[in-house]
Image (cartoon, grey):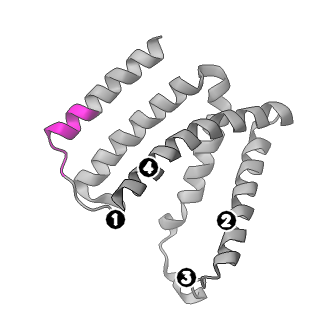
């Protein structure tokens, strides 16, 4: 079963690269990067909303929603930042540069979050192997960006 989680994680990388190109082309077609981001999120919203309706799982009560800390709602804002940044930068620096820099940032943040157990992640100490992995990835990013 773990294999499928690794497979899905790998496929998100392919989807991420594809999304960068698709959203960049939408930006060109609409001649407006913010409108392209709005459309991308709108289609994603309606897709997820439809899936939620089909699955029929109940939503939380209003009381539960009121008790959720404000910062736990910021995922959508971070997603908007990511998608808009991709739409603005991928035509200028290319998909490989954008994604390698993005992945390096993701991995660095993830190692820190894991090490300290931030944001509810299980604690996974930043050992020598993880640090070496981050360093090697950063070296790889430098090589990709230098091309």
Which quarter of the rendered picture does the N terminus lie within? Answer: bottom left
Q: Please give the label number shown on residue 101.
A: none
Which badge, 1 or 3, comes first in the chain's sequence?
3
Q: CA distance from mark 1 to mark 3?
A: 20 Å
- Mark 1, Cα crowd under 10 Å, few <14 / some 14-19 / many 20+, is few
Instruction: Say which of 144 and 82 sits in front.
Output: 144
Which badge, 1 or 2, comes first in the chain's sequence?
2
Instruction: Say which of 87 and 69 sits in front.
Output: 87
Residue 28 coordinates in the image, percent (x, y):
80, 30
Dot 3: element: helix
Instruction: Say which of 128 and 76 sits in front.
Output: 128
Q: Please give the label number shown on residue 48.
A: 2
What's the magenta region?
A: 125-133
According to the picture, the residue beneath numbered tag 3 turns out to be 66
Given the current orientation, which residue lies at the most extreme right position? 30
Q: CA distance from mark 4 to mark 3?
A: 36 Å
Q: Is residue 145 above or below residue 22?
A: above
Q: CA distance from mark 2 to mark 3?
A: 22 Å
Given the current orientation, which residue lies at the most extreme left position? 128
Instruction: Say which of 72 and 128 sits in front.
Output: 128
According to the picture, the residue beneath numbered tag 4 turns out to be 7
Residue 146 coordinates in the image, percent (x, y):
45, 12
Q: CA distance from mark 4 to mark 2?
A: 21 Å
Q: CA distance from mark 1 to mark 2?
A: 24 Å
Q: Is residue 52 above or below residue 138?
A: below
According to the picture, the residue beneath numbered tag 1 turns out to be 120
């Amino acid at each position: 079963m773990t294999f499928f989680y690794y497979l899905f994680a790998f496929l998100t990388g392919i989807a991420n690269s594809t999304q960068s190109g698709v959203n960049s082309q939408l930006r060109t077609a609409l001649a407006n990067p913010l409108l392209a981001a709005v459309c991308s999120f709108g289609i994603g919203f309606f897709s997820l909303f439809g899936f939620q309706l089909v699955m029929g799982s109940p939503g939380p009560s209003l009381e539960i929603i009121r008790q959720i800390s404000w910062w736990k709602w910021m995922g959508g804002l971070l997603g908007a930042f990511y998608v808009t940044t991709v739409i603005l930068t991928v035509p200028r620096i290319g998909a490989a540069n954008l994604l390698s820099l993005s992945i390096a940032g993701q991995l660095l943040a993830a190692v820190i979050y894991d090490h300290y157990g931030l944001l509810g992640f299980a604690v996974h100490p930043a050992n020598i192997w993880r640090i070496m992995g981050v360093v090697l990835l950063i070296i790889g990013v430098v090589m990709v960006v230098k091309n």
